[in-house]
Image: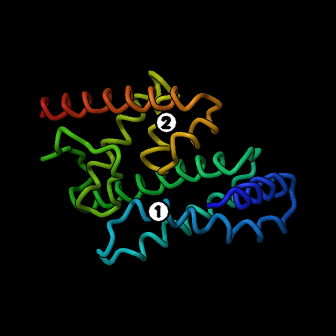
Amino acid sequence: MNPFENQDITALLKAWGTGEDAALNKLLPLVYRELKRMARRYSRAGDGRSLETTALVHEAYLRLVDVTSVSWQERSHFFAVAAQIMRRIMVDAARARRSQKRGGQFRLANQSTEVDFDQIPDIGASRADELLAVHDALEVLAQMDSRQAKVVEMRFFGGLSIDEIAEVLGISPQSVKRDWKLAKAWLGREFKKANHNQ
């Protein structure tokens, strides 16, 4: 995305936030491509699940349009909120799949003790448990260190860059890198403990 589009998105978000409905119509084509890129991270290329990717984008966009209590600051802020919304949509879908598959019982059977946090789990049924395990672990991490949890959410679920996350959180890129590293280590230990206790 070029710098001019970034400025346009920020200006349109602020205009939309002040009640200018025409700004929303201009915003859609600019953010749609980025939302689609984010959603593609949730599906594997060539596996025939493009409808799920499109559905995820549309559902996320519809929820974003309904957000009225947010004072949009800039492009990165918008996409950070989009990452949070996509996470919720994916977790809801994974819970529904798990309920159908196992009668609602959660277990992390055959889960690798290593989760690649640089690769988002897809929204297919085969990895629903992994996605839910990451989500549940993030909920615990958020109680201990909310900033680290936000970094993981924006990076893992939203695909935001280190610089974008730093901009959203108002911290240095070095702080984001440190939080990312510490959070991944903590989450890895949690997965090892969970597997050891099964």
**Residue 29 coordinates in the image, percent (x, y):** 68, 71
Badge 1 amino acid: Ala
Disc 1 secondary structure class: helix
Residue sitting nearer the eye, 143 or 148: 148
**Residue 56 coordinates in the image, percent (x, y):** 49, 65
Q: In this image, 26 relative to 101: left or right?
A: right
Location of the N terminus (image quadrant): bottom right
In the picture of the structure, the residue carrying the numbered disc 1 is: 39
Q: In this image, 72 relative to 133: left or right?
A: right
**Residue 24 coordinates in the image, percent (x, y):** 77, 65
- Is 133 drawn above or below residue 45 in the view shown? above
Rendered residue at 26%/50% (across/down) = 129
Q: How many marks?
A: 2
In the picture of the structure, the residue carrying the numbered disc 2 is: 151
Q: In this image, 187 relative to 110: left or right?
A: right
Toward which corner of the image does residue 31 lie, by quadrant? bottom right
Residue count near mark 2 (Cα–Cα under 10 Å), binned few <14, some 14–19, many ≥20: many
